Image (cartoon, rainbow, N blue to C red):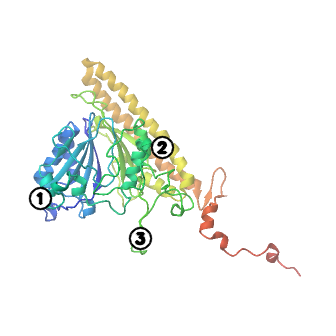
């Protein structure tokens, strides 16, 4: 997110072409991170960001991951007044790029789940559709689209399909769209395919889409549906929704897959971006808010950071800008959350409610902080005579109060892991008293054959025989 509220999130997608960077003997200069950075440096609108990234990709080449499964990229690009979905992949020769973008209707919501979604495009309507000049020519030259056989479909032409299995993307699309618009009664088994659209590209939400709703969506494991990952043998006796890889060098891996949830164990971080306009174009103040959650969404606490404070000294609290994966450091927010996540996975059913209570508490406190700064920003905007000094003061306030809240959250999560370890260790619950046996649920004991094990001998056979 930049100071004008232009915001970008990313989803890796499969593509039929694979580019290589110049650093590895290829012809492409840009990957998705660099395109995003340049767009945020140069643009005050989402549409400008889309056009800038597309033009640079075409001119200098684009590369994604080294395999077709991740060779394409999708960005969801939003600003205060509009939102776009942007898809890009390498040209077949590796020296350029092919891209397409579609504007999200103002009263709609959409998503991307590791697969291209844009299909038919009206390129005469530049207010809602943008694309690279080579879009049709490359598809025809490669035999991916025959104009005589039908309307051009971007996903059908350029997508390599879902990654992993038939519902890797499709189930997440179904879940998110269903939560946004339940009355549509979408079919969870339709999945997504390359040659036809199975779910609507966007939907009109049937309730307000708040930051809190998006936090919950990020944490979703299909709870309450037939695909609930907290149910069944794979969840273990204590209802963990986390699924590790199916096999490795230690264990042979049979053909198959687990359900792919929205919240994942291997998540590095997740974001919710509130793309609001700055109070003043000359002296941006409250503006956009970036809610950041280190590690997995269902273990993390989302903390607000203010775009207007970017560039200020200590704009990002220390626990959120230090640490590395190879060295445990509980003063960092990522490691504090990692420890909560890994311990909670052991007895998820018991620990998750406590983690959720803290999430609700501290995310509500973050929302109250945002509201208070918004009120101060409106006062600044109303008093034009002292706007410059007022906004400078507001930036300082955002850094100080936002930083204090972020540090408090990081410290709380470090303490929370200790509390969870203390409360649940060695198979016991240790509050309100120590050593209360938890045991296993009956359904799980039955399925693992507990009742079939030889029963102990009658009590009298165990009594000592005295002379």
- Lower position in the chain sequence, tag 1 or tag 3: 1
Q: Are marks 2 and 1 in contact (CB under 8 Å)?
A: no
Q: Residue furthest bottom?
A: 467
Query: Residues under labels 3 and 2: Cα distance?
Result: 33 Å
Residue under pointer 1:
95
Label 1 Cα crowd, 10 Å radius (few <14 / some 14-19 / many 20+): many
Mark 2 falls on what kind of element?
helix
Q: Give the image location of residue 258, x and y in percent.
A: 43, 63
Q: Quick check: 17 left or right of 449?
A: left
Label 3 Cα crowd, 10 Å radius (few <14 / some 14-19 / many 20+): few
Rendering quarter of residue 3: top left
- Lower position in the chain sequence, tag 3 or tag 2: 3
Q: Quick check: 5 left or right of 134?
A: right
Q: Is residue 314 above or below residue 219?
A: above
Label 2 Cα crowd, 10 Å radius (few <14 / some 14-19 / many 20+): many
Q: Is residue 143 above or below residue 2?
A: below
Residue under pointer 2:
359
Q: Quick check: 288 left or right of 337?
A: left
Q: Are marks 3 and 2 in contact (CB under 8 Å)?
A: no
Residue under pointer 3:
247
Q: Give the image location of residue 459, x and y in percent.
A: 80, 73
Rendering quarter of residue 22: bottom left
């Amino acid at each position: 997110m930049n100071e004008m509220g232009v915001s970008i999130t990313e989803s890796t997608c499969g593509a039929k072409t694979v580019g290589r960077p110049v650093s590895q003997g290829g012809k492409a200069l840009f990957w998705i991170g660099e395109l995003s950075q340049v767009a945020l440096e140069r643009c005050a609108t989402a549409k400008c960001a889309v056009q800038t990234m597309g033009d640079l990709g075409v001119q200098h080449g684009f590369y994604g991951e080294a395999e077709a499964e991740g060779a394409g990229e999708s960005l969801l690009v939003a600003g205060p007044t509009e939102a776009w979905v942007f898809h890009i992949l390498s040209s077949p020769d590796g020296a350029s790029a092919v891209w397409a973008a579609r504007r999200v209707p103002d009263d709609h919501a959409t998503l991307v789940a590791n697969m291209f979604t844009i299909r038919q495009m009206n390129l005469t309507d530049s207010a809602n559709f943008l694309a690279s000049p080579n879009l049709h020519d490359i598809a025809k030259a490669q035999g991916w689209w025959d104009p005589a056989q039908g309307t051009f479909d971007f996903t059908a032409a350029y997508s390599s399909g879902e990654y992993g299995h038939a519902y890797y993307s499709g189930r997440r699309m179904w879940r998110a769209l269903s939560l946004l618009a339940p009355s549509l009664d979408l079919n969870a088994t339709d999945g997504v395919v390359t040659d036809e659209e199975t779910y609507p590209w966007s939907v009109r939400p049937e309730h307000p889409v708040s930051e809190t709703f998006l936090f919950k969506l990020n944490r979703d494991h299909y709870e309450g549906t037939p695909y609930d990952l907290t149910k069944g043998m794979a969840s273990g006796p204590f209802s963990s929704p986390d699924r590790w890889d199916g096999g490795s060098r230690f264990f042979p891996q049979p053909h198959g897959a687990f359900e792919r949830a929205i919240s994942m164990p291997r998540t590095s971080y997740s974001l919710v971006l509130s793309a609001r306009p700055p109070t003043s174009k000359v002296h941006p103040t409250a503006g956009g808010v970036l809610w950041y959650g280190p590690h997995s969404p269902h273990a993390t606490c989302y903390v607000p950071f203010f775009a207007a404070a970017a560039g200020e000294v200590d704009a990002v609290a220390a626990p959120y800008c230090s640490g590395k994966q190879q060295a445990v450091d509980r003063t960092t927010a990522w490691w504090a959350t990692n420890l909560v996540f890994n311990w909670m996975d052991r007895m998820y059913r018991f620990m998750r409610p406590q983690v959720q209570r803290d999430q609700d508490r501290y995310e509500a406190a973050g929302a109250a902080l945002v509201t208070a700064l918004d009120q101060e920003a409106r006062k600044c905007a109303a008093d034009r005579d002292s706007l410059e000094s007022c906004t400078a003061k507001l930036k300082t306030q955002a850094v100080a109060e936002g930083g204090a809240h972020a540090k408090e959250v990081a410290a709380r999560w470090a303490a929370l892991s200790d509390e969870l370890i203390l409360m649940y260790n060695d198979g016991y619950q240790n509050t309100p008293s120590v050593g209360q046996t938890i045991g296993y649920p009956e359904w799980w004991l039955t399925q693992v054959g507990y009742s079939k094990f030889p029963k102990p001998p009658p009590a009298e056979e165990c009594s000592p025989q005295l002379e």
